[in-house]
Amino acid sequence: MFGSNSKPVVGITCCSTLNGIHHQQVVGDKYIRALIEGSDVIPVLIPGFGEQMAAILPHLDGLYLTGSYSNMEPHHFGGDDLGVEMPRDPNRDTTNLYLLKQAVELKMPVFGICRGFQEMNVALGGTLHQQLFTLDNMMEHRENKSLTIDEQYSLAHELTLNPQGVLAEIMAGELTQQVNSLHGQGVAKLAPPLKVEASAPDGLVEAFSLADNSSFYLGVQWHPEWKIQQQPFYAAIFKRFGEACRHFQEIKN
Ligand SMILES: N[C@@H](CCC(=O)NCCCC(=O)O)C(=O)O
C-alpha cells in the first residue's frame, strides 16, 4: 500500500459502539499497541460497514480481528435466539464474516482474538456454544468483573498445545502454556477446514488454524494482546503473525 520497502499493512475491523447518543467505530488501544509493538506492522482501521469494506483487502497484508464484549448473533451459526439480553454488534458480524471468507480466498494472513476467534470459526462453517457457563463439566471461562483489570487479564488456566500445530512450533515444543480467560461463549462445532491448535483442561477448543496450512489463519480464545512484554508466549504469537504478513507482502504481487 505504501511502497515496496514499507512495513506490512494490517486491517483491524472496528466495533460499533454508542458514545452518548452518537454511534462510533472503535478498536481498543491494547489491540493496536500489541500489533505495532509485537508484529511490527502498520495498522489500518476498517469500519463495520458491510461487504463494501472488502475493497480495502487488495491493499492489505493481513487481517486482525479483536475481542469484544458483544456476542455474534446466533442466526449466523444456526443457533436459536435464547431471548436473553446481550450486547450485539450486527454490523461487525456481517462485515467480519464477509471479510474473513474473502481473506481466506486470497490466502491473506488472519489473526483473531476471542470474539474474532469465534467469528473465524463461524465464517468457515463452525458453531458456537452461546452460554458455556450453563454446560456441565465446563470450567468457568468468564472473568470476574469485580476484580481489577490486571487481575481479570491474569493467567487463569492451562493450555495444551497440539504438537503438530503452529503454536507448538512457535514455542519450540513446550506443549503446556498458561493463558488468561475472559469469555462466555466458545466453539461448539469446529469448522471443517480447521484443526485444533490448543485446548483447555475441560476440552474446550482454545486455538485453531487451517488444517491444510494453506495460509496463516490463527484464532485464539484468550487475550495475548494483554501486556505482551510480560508473556513470551503472547509476544511470540504476535511476532509470528508479523512474519506471516511480511511473507504475504513479498509474494502477493
Ligand atoms: N463476547 C464473546 C467474546 C468475548 C470477548 O471477546 N471479550 C473481550 C473482552 C474485552 C476485551 O478485552 O476486548 C464471549 O463472551 O465469548
Image (cartoon, rainbow, N blue to C red):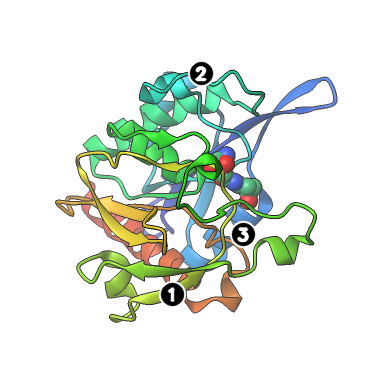
Residue drawn 85% across the image and 26% down it = 20
- Residue denoted by label 3: 33
Question: Badges 1 and 2: C-beta atoms under 8 Å apart?
Answer: no
View quadrant of ligand 1 = top right
Q: Quadrant of residue 117?
A: top left
Residues under labels 1 and 3: Cα distance? 23 Å
- Residue denoted by label 2: 81
In the picture, the quarter occupied by the N terminus is top left
Would residue 249 be visible to someone looking at this image? Answer: yes
SS of the residue under disc 2: loop
- Amino acid bearing label 1: Gln
- Residue denoted by label 1: 177
Residue drawn 26% across the image and 66% down it = 162
| First in sequence: mark 1 vs mark 2 | 2
Q: Of the residues tagged 2 and 3, which is closer to the observer?
A: 2
Classify 203 as above or below 17: below
Residue drawn 49% across the image and 78% down it = 232
Looking at this view, is 220 or 178 the one in front? 178
Residues under labels 1 and 2: Cα distance? 35 Å
